[in-house]
Image (cartoon, rainbow, N blue to C red):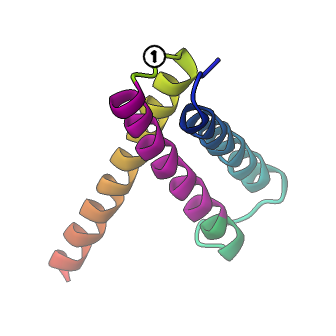
Amino acid sequence: MPRTKLGRWAGALAALFIVLLLVALNESKWLGLKIGDYRLILLGISMMLSGIAAFVTGIISIVKFKERSPIVILAVVLGFIAVLIIIMEVGEALAESAQL
Protein backbone atom coordinates (compact mmCIF):
# COMPACT_ATOMS: atom_id res chain seq x y z
CA MET A 1 0.00 0.00 0.00
CA PRO A 2 1.20 3.51 -0.73
CA ARG A 3 2.47 5.43 2.28
CA THR A 4 1.70 8.94 1.07
CA LYS A 5 -1.53 10.66 0.19
CA LEU A 6 -0.23 11.41 -3.29
CA GLY A 7 0.64 7.74 -3.75
CA ARG A 8 -2.91 6.77 -2.84
CA TRP A 9 -4.22 9.28 -5.38
CA ALA A 10 -1.98 7.79 -8.05
CA GLY A 11 -3.31 4.31 -7.26
CA ALA A 12 -6.91 5.47 -7.32
CA LEU A 13 -6.44 7.26 -10.65
CA ALA A 14 -4.80 4.16 -12.12
CA ALA A 15 -7.75 2.07 -10.93
CA LEU A 16 -10.10 4.59 -12.54
CA PHE A 17 -8.12 4.31 -15.78
CA ILE A 18 -8.53 0.52 -15.78
CA VAL A 19 -12.23 0.69 -14.94
CA LEU A 20 -12.93 3.22 -17.69
CA LEU A 21 -10.95 1.12 -20.17
CA LEU A 22 -12.99 -1.97 -19.33
CA VAL A 23 -16.24 -0.01 -19.52
CA ALA A 24 -15.32 1.41 -22.93
CA LEU A 25 -14.42 -2.02 -24.29
CA ASN A 26 -17.51 -3.73 -22.93
CA GLU A 27 -19.93 -0.96 -23.77
CA SER A 28 -18.84 -0.91 -27.39
CA LYS A 29 -19.42 -4.67 -27.63
CA TRP A 30 -22.68 -4.88 -25.69
CA LEU A 31 -24.41 -1.82 -27.09
CA GLY A 32 -22.94 -2.06 -30.56
CA LEU A 33 -21.56 1.47 -30.49
CA LYS A 34 -19.66 2.54 -33.56
CA ILE A 35 -16.31 4.33 -33.59
CA GLY A 36 -16.94 8.05 -33.25
CA ASP A 37 -19.98 7.76 -31.01
CA TYR A 38 -19.99 10.60 -28.49
CA ARG A 39 -20.29 8.21 -25.52
CA LEU A 40 -17.15 6.36 -26.52
CA ILE A 41 -15.34 9.64 -27.13
CA LEU A 42 -16.27 10.90 -23.65
CA LEU A 43 -15.15 7.62 -22.10
CA GLY A 44 -11.88 7.76 -23.98
CA ILE A 45 -11.17 11.35 -22.97
CA SER A 46 -11.97 10.56 -19.33
CA MET A 47 -9.79 7.47 -19.46
CA MET A 48 -6.83 9.37 -20.92
CA LEU A 49 -7.17 12.22 -18.43
CA SER A 50 -7.18 9.80 -15.50
CA GLY A 51 -4.18 7.99 -16.98
CA ILE A 52 -2.20 11.21 -17.37
CA ALA A 53 -3.17 12.32 -13.87
CA ALA A 54 -2.04 8.94 -12.49
CA PHE A 55 1.26 9.33 -14.33
CA VAL A 56 1.90 12.84 -13.00
CA THR A 57 0.90 12.09 -9.42
CA GLY A 58 2.87 8.85 -9.46
CA ILE A 59 6.03 10.54 -10.77
CA ILE A 60 5.74 13.32 -8.17
CA SER A 61 5.15 10.75 -5.44
CA ILE A 62 8.19 8.72 -6.49
CA VAL A 63 10.55 11.68 -6.95
CA LYS A 64 9.47 13.96 -4.10
CA PHE A 65 8.36 11.52 -1.42
CA LYS A 66 10.47 8.46 -2.40
CA GLU A 67 7.35 6.29 -2.72
CA ARG A 68 8.20 2.76 -3.83
CA SER A 69 4.85 1.04 -3.61
CA PRO A 70 4.00 -1.40 -6.44
CA ILE A 71 0.67 0.36 -6.84
CA VAL A 72 2.38 3.69 -7.52
CA ILE A 73 4.81 2.08 -9.96
CA LEU A 74 1.86 0.45 -11.75
CA ALA A 75 0.14 3.85 -11.88
CA VAL A 76 3.22 5.35 -13.54
CA VAL A 77 3.38 2.52 -16.08
CA LEU A 78 -0.32 2.80 -16.93
CA GLY A 79 -0.03 6.58 -17.16
CA PHE A 80 2.95 6.24 -19.46
CA ILE A 81 0.90 3.95 -21.69
CA ALA A 82 -1.85 6.60 -21.77
CA VAL A 83 0.70 9.24 -22.77
CA LEU A 84 2.01 6.99 -25.55
CA ILE A 85 -1.53 6.42 -26.84
CA ILE A 86 -2.12 10.17 -26.98
CA ILE A 87 1.17 10.74 -28.80
CA MET A 88 0.23 8.06 -31.35
CA GLU A 89 -3.21 9.61 -31.88
CA VAL A 90 -1.75 13.07 -32.43
CA GLY A 91 0.84 11.65 -34.83
CA GLU A 92 -1.84 9.81 -36.74
CA ALA A 93 -3.96 12.95 -37.02
CA LEU A 94 -0.98 14.97 -38.25
CA ALA A 95 -0.08 12.33 -40.82
CA GLU A 96 -3.68 12.18 -42.01
CA SER A 97 -3.91 15.95 -42.35
CA ALA A 98 -0.61 16.05 -44.27
CA GLN A 99 -2.05 13.67 -46.88
CA LEU A 100 -4.98 15.98 -47.58
Q: Is residue 99 above or below residue 22?
A: below
Give the residue type at disc 1. Arg
Residue 14 lies in quadrant: top right
Image coordinates for residue 49, horizontal then vertical, percent: 52, 58
The one of 29 and 68 positioned closer to us in this rendering: 68
Image coordinates for residue 41, horizontal then vertical, percent: 60, 68
> Where does the magenta region start and end?
43-65
Q: Residue furthest right?
A: 30
For label 1, the residue is 68
Image coordinates for residue 13, horizontal then vertical, percent: 61, 43
The one of 1 and 20 positioned closer to us in this rendering: 1
Q: Residue furthest left?
A: 98
Image coordinates for residue 43, horizontal then vertical, percent: 66, 61
Horizontal side, residue 37 vs residue 70: left or right: right
Magenta region includes residue 1: no
Q: Residue at x 45, y 36 (%)?
A: 58
Magenta region includes residue 49: yes
Residue 5 lies in quadrant: top right
Q: Residue at x 65, y 38 (%)?
A: 18
Question: Quadrant location of the N terminus?
Answer: top right
Describe the element under mark 1 as helix, strand or loop: loop
Q: Is residue 7 above or below residue 73?
A: below
Rate crowding at label 1 as few (under 14), some (14 to 19) or many (20 or more) other CA atoms within 10 Å. some
